[in-house]
Image: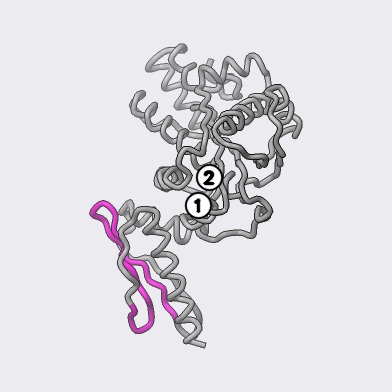
Amino acid sequence: MQDSFQKSALNQIEKTAQILTKLGYSVTSPDKKLYNYEIIVNSKNEKIKFQVYFGNKGIKKILQGNHELKIYKELDELLFGKNLFENNSKDEETFKEYVGTDESGKGDYFGPLVIAAVYINDKTKNELENIGVKDSKLISDNIIKILESKIKKIIGNNFEIIQINPEKYNQLYESFRNLNKIMAWAHSKAIENILSKLKCSNVISDKFGNEKLIKDELKKKNIEVNLYQTTKGERFTAVAAASILARAKVVDWFNIKSREVGFDLSKGGGESVSLAAKRVRHQFDDKYLMKLIKFHFKNSKNIF
């Protein structure tokens, strides 16, 4: 039995080392001790030790090092937080190639709405899965930026991003009067742009609102594709990759604007967000604040 646990421990630590290396970390070869295997992970002069123990009671994984280090927090989330490396069963095997779309920022009072489209085939799908591509909501901002770079290296130019900053967003909302209609317009635009660079007949989108919305927008553009809209679309690799690229743009916007105003702008739409908006309004003015917010959110009633 212990031999079986030992083999499992070795397999787990080798797989972990492989994925962390692909994510840009410096990783030592697995070192066998009496009751465990271990690797040392380095990044920007910080290092941490990851151990996989094997014994009569089974497998135990331990992260050793300073809990305050950035690398410790990143690896703690990657290895224990959200099961980033586990591939759930997927039903995308029928597609040899397809485009996936997803959005980020729709629930944030501050910031843009970003839609991304990503094209993959069998080769790039496997490579993306090997680096731990998964729904961006399960991943921290730091890891998002690491994965963004890795994804772009794998897929090359086979992606499109539509970033609707608050000023443009507010104009569109005045016209559409409906968030789902804005999203349908943006998803269809991302699909149109990526299909102008390559040929692909299958598109998968994370489902939102009425399924006819995106289809109607595509018809207006004379685009004929097999469009599949599904809940929890991030289980599809291309949709998950699109969610990461979209979220990375949102993260960039928040970092830039937070430096601009002199304090961290909060995500979401809660009370802390309203307080931050009031602070911006006090420090600057209404015109400046309107460049940062989605005006139709309920938060605006407590601010203006």
Amino acid at dot 1: Leu
Position of residue 69 measured from the top left corner of the image (x, y, whole percent): 30, 54
Looking at the rendered structure, the number of numbered marks drawn on it comes to 2
Question: Which of these two is toward me, 40 or 126?
Answer: 126
Is 130 a magenta residue?
no
Q: Can residue 269 be seen in this view?
A: no
Q: Give the range drawn in magenta.
A: 32-54
Q: In this view, does 46 lie above or below 202?
A: below
Q: Do the residues labelled 2 and 1 touch (CB within 8 Å)?
A: yes
Position of residue 88 measured from the top left corner of the image (x, y, whole percent): 61, 59
Label 2 SS:
helix
Indicate which disc, 2 or 1, sits on the residue closer to the N terminus: 1
Question: Which of these two is toward me, 185 or 250?
Answer: 185
Question: Which of these two is toward me, 302 or 167?
Answer: 167
Question: Which of these two is toward me, 161 or 135?
Answer: 161
Residue at 30% over, 67% down: 28
Residue 128 is marked as 1
Give the prevailing secondary structure in the magenta stretch: strand
Q: Is residue 296 visible?
A: yes
Q: Mark 2 points at which residue?
A: 241
Q: In which quarter of the image is residue 189?
A: top right
Label 1 SS:
helix
Residue at 67% over, 23% down: 221
Position of residue 251 measured from the top left corner of the image (x, y, whole percent): 44, 36
Q: Quadrant of residue 270?
A: top right
Crowd rating for badge 2 (residues with CA inside 10 Å; few <14, some 14–19, many 20+): many
Q: In this view, does 200 lie above or below 185?
A: below
Amino acid at dot 2: Ala
Q: In which quarter of the image is residue 209?
A: top right
